[in-house]
Amino acid sequence: MSAAATAIILKNCIRTNLTRLDSMANGTRALEDVALNNRTFLKDFRRLVTRTAFDVLDIKDEAEFISRYSPVTATATFLAGVGSRWVDSVNIAGAADVIDTSLPRCTALVDDVLDPGSKIPIGTYNLRAVKGLGSPYIIWGSHRDLIEQIAAAAGMENASFVRQAVPEGAKGPLGHGDAMASLLPELPSSVKFVVCNFGGGAHSRETILSSLAILAALQHLDGSRPSGVLPVGLFEAPKYLVVLDAKGAPVEFRHNRLKGSDGPLSPGLSNIGVRLYLKDALPGAVDHFRQFLNPEHSEYIIPGNSERTFALDNIDELLSNRKELETPCIANPIEENGTVKEYQNIGYFIEAQKLLLGVK
C-alpha cells in the first residue's frame, strides 16, 4: 500500500468510526447492542488504527515505535490532588481511621492485582500505564517522600519530580492547568510530545500507546496539526460528553469543568482523562488562560473552575475551537467508569485494572 493511501486510511478511519458510534448512541441502534458489539469492534479498531499509524511512520511493531519515540516524549502523571469528593466520601464511609485524607488521593493503598495479597498506592497503577513510553515526570503537591515511594513501586526510579506549589491563601494545589504551567519549564527542548494521565484514573496502556502513535503519525503527515489527541469511549451516561460534527470532528464539550453544570445524561462519547499534546502548543494555550489569573483579574473565574484555576479540559476546548484536536474513539469505557473520585469507587477501580491488565 502506498504511503498516500495509508495516510488517507488513517485520517478517515478515525473520524468514520467516531461518527458511526455517535449515531449509534443517538438512537439508530439500541444501546445494549452497541455495548455488546463494540467491545470487540473497539479493540479491533484500536489495533487497526495503531497498525496504520505504524505504517505511516514506517515502523514494524510496538517495540520499534517506543524505541524511536520515547526519547522525544515526556509522560506527565499528575499526583498532587486530594479532592473534596474523596475527603467527604472517606469520612461518610467511616474509613478515616485507615485513610489519611490530608494525603494526596494517589497514596491510598489498594490491592495489587499483579501480586495478589499485596497492597500498593493507587498512583502506582497510573505510573505503570505510562512506564517506558517517555521520560517520566511526576507532578506533586505535598509529601514528596510518599510520592517517591509510589514511583519506586512502579519501577520509575529515574522519574523527575515537579512540585505544584500551593499559592498563598489557597487550601491546596490549584487545577491541573496550573500543574501543566509548573511542568513546562522543566521539559527539555528534545521533548516533542507530552502524555498526561492522572492519579486515580483506570488508564489503559494500550489506549495511551495508540493515542501517541496517532499523534505522531498525523504530525508526520501534516507537520503542524493536530496539536492534541483526546481519546474517547462510548458511554451510556458520559460524564465528559464530547459532541461531534458530521465529519467526526469535536465541536463541543458538555461537562461541568467547562460549562459549570452537568450535561445531559444520555448515551454518547466521553473522554477518559488521558490526553496527549504537542509540547510546542502548550505554552501559548497555558498563557491564554493564565493571563486572567493574575491580580489584575482577581475576580475573573474561568467557567467551570474555582477562582484562580483552569484545567486541561479548557486547553482541550481551546485546541478544538482551533481545529487542532483529534478525538479517536479507542478507549474502553471501564477507563472512565473505574476512575477513583470517591472512596466507594475503589472496588470498581480494582475490577477495571483486572480487565485492563488481563488478570483473571
Image: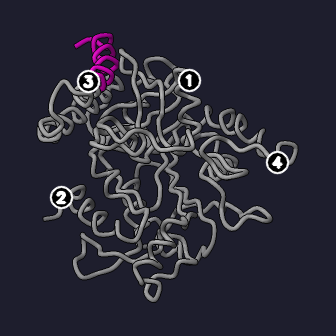
Q: Is the magenta region chiefly helix, strand or loop?
A: helix
Does residue 117 sit above or below 159 in this rendering?
A: below
| Residue 111 in view of the camera | yes
Does the residue at mark 2 contact the one at mark 3 (Cβ under 8 Å)?
A: no
Q: Quick one: label 4 or label 1, which is nearer the N terminus?
A: 4
Q: Local crowd at mark 4 within 10 Å, few (<14), some, or many (≥20)? A: few
Q: Secondary structure at mark 2?
A: loop
Of circles 4 and 2, the one toward us is 4
Identify the residue position indicated by label 1 in the image: 321
Work out how far the residue at label 4 is from the one at label 1, CA to CA, in angstroms: 26 Å
* Element type at mark 1: helix
The residue range painted magenta reads: 1-19
**Residue 187 visible, this orientation:** no
What separation in Å lies between label 2 and label 3 (alpha carbons)? 30 Å
Q: Residue at x 33, y 16 (%)?
A: 7
Q: Are marks 4 and 3 in contact (CB under 8 Å)?
A: no
Q: How many marks?
A: 4
Which amino acid type is shown beneath numbered disc 4?
Ser
Q: Which residue is mark 2?
A: 358
